[in-house]
Image (cartoon, grey):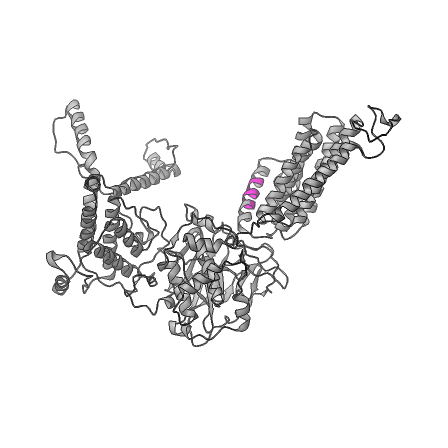
Amino acid sequence: MSGGVRLAVCAAAATLAAAGALLPLVDRSAWIVQAAFLLTIQTSVGVLARRVPLARALTVAVQALVALLLLTVVFARAQAVGGLLPGPDVFQEFGQLLREGASDIGRYAIPAPATAAIRLMLVGGVLVIGLVVDALAVTYRSAAPAGLPLLALYSVAAGLAEGTDWLWFLAAAAGYLLLLLAEGRDRLAQWGRVFGGGGARPGPAAHPLGPGQGPAIAPVRTGRRIGALALGIALLVPAALPTMDGGLLQARGQSPGEGGTGGGSGAVSPLVALQDSLRQPENREVLRYRTSTQNTGDLYLRIVTLDQFDGSTWRTSPGRPVTEVPDPLPTPAGLAPGVRTDPVNTSVAASGSYAQTYLPLPYPAQQVRIGGRWRYEPEGRMVVGGHAQTTRGARYQVTSLLVEPTAAQLSTAPAAPQRLLREYTKVPGSLPKVVAQTARKVTAGAANPYQQAVKLQEWFAVDGGFRYDTEVRSGSGPDAIARFLQAKEGFCVHFSFSMAAMARTLGIPARVAVGFTPGTPQADGSMSVGSKDAHAWPELYFEGAGWTRFEPTPSRGTPPEYTVAETPAGSDPGAPSPRPDRSAAPSAPVRSGDDCTPRLKKVDGCPALAQQPGGGASDGGPRAGTVTAVAVAALVVLVLPVLPMLWRRRVRARRLGTAGASRRGPAGEAAAAATSGPGGRPVGPAVLPDDDPRETVERTLAAWRELTDSAWDYGILPDDAQTPRKAAARIVRIGALDGPSAESAVRVATAVEQALYAPTPRPVGALAAEVESVRAGLRAAAGRGARLRAVLAPRSAARVAWACSRRWSAALERLRTGRIVAVWRRAGGALRPSRQRG
């Protein structure tokens, strides 16, 4: 075998050795046989091209062309010209497959199904890396840099698999060393023996221009030693360094396989894209459903449960048996007949862009009707697709139970079965002791596990000073929970994982569920679930009620009613808010950065752009061009600076007029007078009879909107991610309010919570006076410059610019889609559509 052929074979072998690290990423390894066959053809073409010989660049180009033809035949034969030649349709098909593959990488956990898109990325990647290695090591005779693409191939596998077996690294390193050795032998064979051995006499075979014969050459022996030393260092040094664990809050689910036990076929990675989904500016709809229950606040759609906690990761336990989907599903574990349950019928339609293996279901599902290849995992009551079955475009019906235990039933729940206690209270020894210590400290005084669970939920959601923030990194290693408890900021993954771990330290069976919050009500009566509704929450087990949902994440989701049943309304400022009645005031997750919160949108929409005073028609005057221009310029100079002030006054008058007005008779006026102090200022929230609940909500939210905008005018930016109570406390703290002003802010926030969350909002009193009291306190605490700016250049006037921007974008979009153009053309006009997009 000549040196060039030997070197080409070593380059292909090194590429395949590094590609072996990709094998654990998919559930079947047949792709690597296909990749090896195609790589052999590509390498053989390179050998023949160098034998011709062709120019180096032309050799690489021929190999690339052959690789393209091979991929076309394998993955896009139907779109190729004559089944072989690539055309525009082939490249379009490749682009579509690559997009689907990139989406599948973020959607599936390890091992993923070997779909056509994923196989194209794997096989195509091996061919590209093989071409680069062959070009560097063989065509351009520089094997050392060829280690970089080999390292890149191995690193991709290790990164996606969150670490890979050291044997794959050993195989890739051995392939690279073999390539270096082959190159060294080839070079020395061409130039002869440069360094002789000890006292070896030169013979005929040792001619400087002849091939070196005899014992191993010194440079070759030296290369072997250096390679072995480098490989040993690469393997031993990481073992001596601190461990880099897999992410504690980067768990990935494992799907039950097609056989009788879980194996991981087609697993969904439930947390890989959760944080990215919450960060996306667009709330892309993933599914829509209709349900028979009015209590949609508790209709969480669960995808998968994570029940194995090893101190560094949360994941679904492997090896769970799966069966055919029974009809009906078995009775939920631990659910006793004495606990109230209401049957719920739900019809779900998944988006065509939403494809994953696990089926989103209300818990606990009793019956599932869906076509396709689906399997059932009894322990987690999960329905999982087999043979690349996904939810893309799926339509299915679910009958589930709305379990409504009482606080008394949960307080008196007997101990869980020993099997559940052994499995679901496991806490690894690597978990920092501060986690268990904090759990005991937070739950001090609790009489039973239920009270401990409620105290944990209240501490995370209300009392502990935690802040919801999707920009916080998930963290890794056994210390991640301890760091989160110290930093006190994160998103749902941090809160759910930490509460479940702390509950386990208290001996309460716990696991984590991943899925979606109920979504947003639509005008047609359906519920829309978007990517921003992705959520994670803890489930704790109580005998009699079974696995029970808790909600520790502040400003996200809905606290279950049984966690607040024992708390009188309004008695504890730190208690979690009651469950909202979506039929009266439907809500969606509050997203910071919006100019109008979703809760306000559901009542009367965002404040529209007010008509600007001074912008009306003039009362006449000279028509001379010069005089008119001067008058317009003067008007602009005089009016523009005061427009924010005039707009702000108009909006304030409208809001406070709405907040202060009510349809009430003499009894209502008497009630209002009875609750007023000196000067007419209310001393407490007045209850006015005969008010319409919708009008009450409208007036309350108008007052709240004015209060937050007034605080914004004095430099306190609104934070829609906070609850009204926390937002009011923040305004009181930053605005240095005290006395009546602080009390008024708290009363307005309490009225807002009552209006949003109470099943039937109670009438409220003169909130306009409460807001004026807060404004007076802000004005008194502010300096002279701040007071002038709040009046002349209020910061909340930025809403005008936002409203104009939205309308301008909408108008440009209508122009782009041709609606206005079509109308004008039919009318005989001619208009060229704008190229600028909104």
Quarter assignment of residue 217 = top right
Q: Nearer the viewer, residue 408 or 188?
A: 188
Placement of the C terminus among the 4 image quadrants:
top left
Residue at 33% of width from left, 35% of height from top? 824
The reply to whether the magenta stretch includes residue 88 is no
**Which segment did they paint magenta?**
94-101
> Extreme front residue here?
199
Is 421 above or below relative to 786? Answer: below
Q: Is residue 491 among the parts visible in the rendering?
A: no
Q: Say whether residue 251 is left or right of residue 116.
A: left
Number of numbered discs overlaid on the protein picture: 0
In this rendered view, identify the residue nearer to me: 583 or 731: 731
Magenta span has 98? yes
Image side of residue 677 versus residue 317, left or right:
left
Residue 323 in the image: state x and y as whole percent: 59, 65
Q: Is residue 622 left or right of residue 569?
A: left
Q: Is residue 231 above or below residue 316?
A: above
Magenta stretch, overall SS: helix
Q: In the rendered image, which quarter contains the N terminus?
A: top right
**Could you say where residue 612 lies in the image, as x and y percent from the top left?**
21, 39
Q: Residue at x 21, y 56 (%)?
A: 744
Can residue 655 be seen here? The reply is: yes
Residue 675 locus on image (x, y percent):
15, 62
Q: Is residue 430 left or right of residue 618?
A: right
